[in-house]
Image (cartoon, coloured by chain):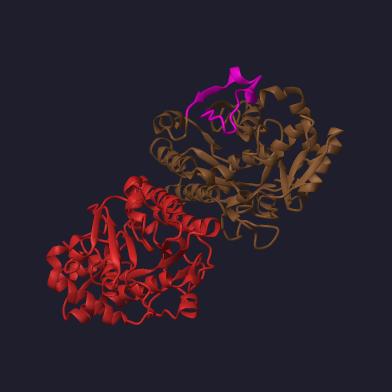
Chain colours: A red, B brown
Amino acid sequence: MMNNFDGAQVLITGGLGFIGSNLARRLDGLGAAITIVDSLIPDYGGNLYNIEGIRERLQVNVSDVRDTHSLRHLVQGKDFLFNLAGQTSHLDSMRNPMPDLEINCQAQLSILETCRAYNPKIKIVFASTRQIYGRPHHLPVAETHPLNPVDINGINKMAGEQYHLLYNDVYGIPATVLRLTNTIGPRMRIKDARQTFVGLWVRQLLENKPISVWGGTQRRDFTDVEDAVDAFLLAAGNASTNGQVYNLGGSEVVDLIRVAKLMVEVHGSGAYEIRDFPADRRAIDIGDYYADFSKIRAELGWTPLRTLRETIGATLDYFRKVMPHYV
Amino acid sequence: MMNNFDGAQVLITGGLGFIGSNLARRLDGLGAAITIVDSLIPDYGGNLYNIEGIRERLQVNVSDVRDTHSLRHLVQGKDFLFNLAGQTSHLDSMRNPMPDLEINCQAQLSILETCRAYNPKIKIVFASTRQIYGRPHHLPVAETHPLNPVDINGINKMAGEQYHLLYNDVYGIPATVLRLTNTIGPRMRIKDARQTFVGLWVRQLLENKPISVWGGTQRRDFTDVEDAVDAFLLAAGNASTNGQVYNLGGSEVVDLIRVAKLMVEVHGSGAYEIRDFPADRRAIDIGDYYADFSKIRAELGWTPLRTLRETIGATLDYFRKVMPHYV
C-alpha cells in the first residue's frame, strides 16, 4: 500500500475505543498527525489505556459527537475522518433507544452537515455493521442483501450509513462505508458483552470462570482488528471507494461452540457452558451470519490475513498482561 | 367492509393535514370518537379548515409529536392510532435536515415507546412513502425492492417505518406500514410543492398561471385520497396486516405532461410550461416510479377505484370553492 498518511491530518471519532485506538496506533506508525475525539461514556468502548505508549503524540479531545460545536472545530483542516463513534450494544438500544438514536443517527447527520459547511473535501470512512442486514435470507451475505434490521441499533446504524452515502452522492463529500462483522482483538471491551460477546468470554476465561455460551450453534465470522484496520486504510486511500459500501468478513466461518473451544485450547485451560438465550436477547438474535466479502477483495485486494486461532492468541496475550486496565 | 370503527377511540397524528383530515371525515361518518393531534407548523400540511363541518365533533389537540408529554396523555385509551404526522418536503429535508430527523425518526420512536409503556394494544397504521425506494431498479416497484433513499426525508422515513415493524415484531404492538405514492385530492397543500407538486399545479391553474412542469417525461402513479383512506381503514381493521408493509398505487401510470394536460382539459382552460430541473431538485429526483400494489390487492382486496380524471375533477371542484383557505 502506498503511504497516503505520512503527514496527513486525521480525525478519529471513537478513537479511544477498540477499533479506533488500533487504527490510531497504525496511523501513528505511518506518520499521521492524529486527533482523537471520544466521549469516554463508561458503557461504551473508550479507554485511555488503549493509547498507552502513543498518547503524547496524539491530540485527545474528550467530547461527545452529539456536541456540534466541538465537532465544528475539530473537522477543520483534516484530510481524513475515520468515523467510528457509536453506541454498539444491541440490548442497550432496545432498553433505552433514544441515546442510540442520538449517537448513531442524529450525531452522524450533524457530523456530515459540519463537514459540508466547514470541510467538504474531507475523506470519510464510516464504520457500519452487519447488524443492518438482520436475519440473513441466505448465506453468505453480500452487500446487495436486503436490509432488515432487527433492533433499534441496526435501524439507526442503517440510517447513519445512508446519510454518509447521500452526502457523498449529493454533495460530493467523499465517503466510504464498511460493514463490519464481529471484530475482535486487543483493546476490545471485555468488561461485558456490550461491544462483542467475545470480549466477555475473554474476561470469563482469564478470571477462571466458565465461558457462558448462549445457544452455541450460531455460525459467525470474525475479523481480526488488524485486518479491519487494513480495510479502513485501504478505503481511505482509494478514491474509487467513494460512495461505496463494503462488507468485511473473516478467514473462517465457525459456530460459537467452536470459538469457545478454541479459546480454551489456546489459553491452555478453562471451560465453557451452554446457556439458553434470555428472552430479550432471543428476540433480537440474528442467527447464522457470515459475510460475502468478495467485493472488497476484488476492488481493493483486502482479505483477512489472520486465522481465528492467531487472533485469539494475540487477544489473550494482550489481556493477560493488562487485564486490570479493562475490568 | 365491516365497521370496526363505530364507537372506536381513534387518534390521528397529523390529523389536520391532507390525508389525516380526509381520514377523520370518513371515520366521523363511521361513528368513531376522534382525537386529532397536529402541530400546525406553517410549512406543513395542517389546516384547520380541513375539518370544517366536523370540527365540533372532534377533539383537536394542537401539539407537536416531538412533545413526549402530550403524546403520553393522548395515546391512552385509544383503540387505533393513524400515524400520519411527518415532514414531507424532500427539499426542506436537504436544506434543514434536523427537523426532518426529529419528526420522522425521533418522534416516531418516542410515539412507539409511549405506546409500549401506556397502550401496547393500540393498533397503529403508519404512513410511509415510496421515497424510501429511491431511484427504482425496475418497474413496477414491489415491497421487496431494495431501499435506497436519495434524500434525508427518505432515509428518516425508512427508519421511522422500521421502528414500527420492530415494535410489532419484538413487543407485539400491532403495526402496519403503508408506503404511499403521490396522493392527491381535496384538502392537499396547494400553497407550494412541499407536499406534492400537484398541489402547486392546482394553485397555478386556478390562479390562471401556467403550470410549471419540471422535466415532464417522468412516469408516476397517483392515488386518490379517498382510495388512500380506504387502505388505511382496511389495514387498521385487519389483524392479518400486523407487521406487514403494503404499497399503495394508482389506477393508471402517466407521465407528468399527461397530468398537466389532463388538468387543463378538466379545468376547461389554462396552460403548462416545461422547465428544466433546478440543480437541487435534480440531485434528489427519483425519475420514473410506479408501484406494484398486488400485495394489498391480494390480501385486503384494495384497489384504486377512482380514475385520475375523476380525482383531478374532484380536486379542482373543491379548491375552486374554497381556495382562499389554502393560499
Residue B85 image point, x, y percent: 54, 36
Please tell me which residue lies in front, A115 or A149.
A115
The reply to whether the magenta stretch includes residue B58 is yes
Query: Looking at the picture, does residue B315 appear above or below residue A221?
Result: above
Horizontal side of A56 relative to A130 (left or right) equals left
Q: Quadrant of residue B182?
A: top right
**Region in magenta:** B37-63
At a point 18% along the width and 74% down the height, the residue shown is A318
Please tell me which residue lies in front, A259 or B70.
B70
Query: Looking at the picture, does residue A304 appear above or below residue A276?
Result: below
Please tell me which residue lies in front, B212 or A284.
B212
Query: Looking at the picture, does residue A67 appear above or below residue A287?
Result: above
Query: Looking at the picture, does residue B281 appear above or below residue B309?
Result: below
Q: Is residue B13 visible?
A: yes
Horizontal side of B284 relative to B265 (left or right) equals left
Q: Which quadrant, please, contains the N terminus of chain A?
A: bottom left
The reply to whether the magenta stretch includes residue B316 is no
Residue B234 image point, x, y percent: 64, 41
At a point 53% along the width and 23% down the height, the residue shown is B60
Q: Is residue A275 visible?
A: no
Q: Which quadrant, please, contains the C terminus of chain A?
A: bottom left
Horizontal side of B268 relative to A315 (left or right) equals right
Residue A44 image point, x, y percent: 27, 56
Residue A145 image point, x, y percent: 53, 67
Q: Quadrant of residue B287?
A: bottom right
Q: Quadrant of residue B272?
A: top right
